[in-house]
Amino acid sequence: MAYIEVQDESKIYQMGETKIVANNALSFEVEAGALTVILGPSGAGKSTVLNILGGMDSPTSGRVLVDGTDIAQFNAKQLTEYRRRAVGFIFQFYNLIPNLTTRENVEMAASLVPDALDADETLRAVGLGARLDNFPAQLSGGEQQRVAIARALAKNPQLLLADEPTGALDYQTGKQVLRLLADASRRDGKTVVIITHNAEIAKMADRVIRINDAQVRSVTDNPEPLSVDAVEW
Ligand SMILES: Nc1ncnc2c1ncn2[C@@H]1O[C@H](COP(=O)(O)OP(=O)(O)OP(=O)(O)O)[C@@H](O)[C@H]1O
């Protein structure tokens, strides 16, 4: 059984008289420990499905099995527990707390779970050992995104979800961030899902799920995913 099984998942937003079908009967699987990219243009429905996988939203219909449990059926309390314990979420614009230091941002996330990793060690592992007492505004965009990755990793979740994690970063900095996410899968066995509109980034994935116009258009496995260093855009 795959770690994630999305079955016929639809999400419809009702805006007054208008219905917006953001996800239209999506079905796909994500394997445990693999690096999966969800690829598609702006408006395709990628963030919608990632937010559902992250327990931040629920589908209108369909099943979303994560490690054998259908999170589509979760009530608000169960979703809160799931978000806290099972998922590390990385946003395009980092979403750090501006008046907490790097260390405090990571410690706060770590305090949500019983088996958290040490905040300082996790920050050292992403190359930020010298910036523990800095505030987010004192860091570059790439450094802030690395804090956000450390914050997600420190909770030690099985699942890492990243929504356009390199979207606000330049090429070299984006590569550093992708390298950390690839290591989380390849070295640490985390299940990593990255959404992007960049087809080049998809070449580093074990599996690429293409979404367009609210539907899954293809699911392709890369027998030989490229290393981050070989990916160019
Ligand atoms: N909360 C919401 N209320 C109403 N419509 C929404 C909501 N969230 C998303 N949508 C709509 O659903 C569709 C899919 O949006 P989504 O953000 O999932 O796409 P995306 O592929 O992630 O795009 P982008 O890369 O631009 O973020 C869009 O038409 C969007 O306007």
Image (cartoon, rainbow, N blue to C red):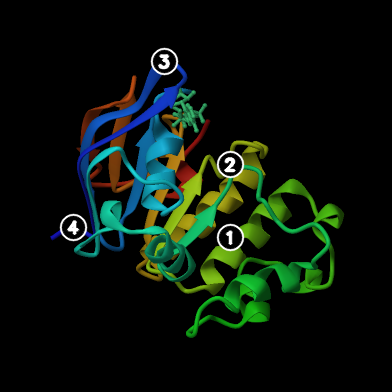
- Asked if residue 144 is positioned above or below residue 169 in the image, the reply reads below
Distance between mark 2 and mark 4 Cα atoms: 27 Å
Left or right of 6, for residue 140: right
Question: Mark 4 is on which residue type?
Answer: Ala
Q: Earlier in the sequence, mark 3 or mark 4?
A: 4
Q: Position of residue 117 (x, y in %)?
A: 54, 81
Mark sitting on residue 43: none
Question: Mark 1 is on which residue type?
Answer: Ile
Dot 1 falls on a residue whose secondary structure is helix
Q: Earlier in the sequence, mark 1 or mark 2?
A: 1
Mark sitting on residue 149: 1
Dot 3 falls on a residue whose secondary structure is strand
Q: Position of residue 82 (x, y in %)?
A: 40, 65
Dot 2 falls on a residue whose secondary structure is loop
Distance between mark 3 and mark 4 Cα atoms: 36 Å
Distance between mark 1 and mark 3 Cα atoms: 37 Å
Q: Earlier in the sequence, mark 3 or mark 2?
A: 3
Distance between mark 3 and mark 2 Cα atoms: 33 Å
Decide: marks 4, 1 in contact (CB < 8 A)? no
> Residue at the spot x=53%, y=30% of the render?
233
According to the picture, the residue beneath numbered tag 3 turns out to be: 18
Q: Which label sits in the foreground, 3 or 2?
A: 3
According to the picture, the residue beneath numbered tag 2 turns out to be: 166
Q: Earlier in the sequence, mark 4 or mark 1?
A: 4
Decide: marks 3, 4 in contact (CB < 8 A)? no
According to the picture, the residue beneath numbered tag 4 turns out to be: 2
Residue toward you, 52 or 193: 52
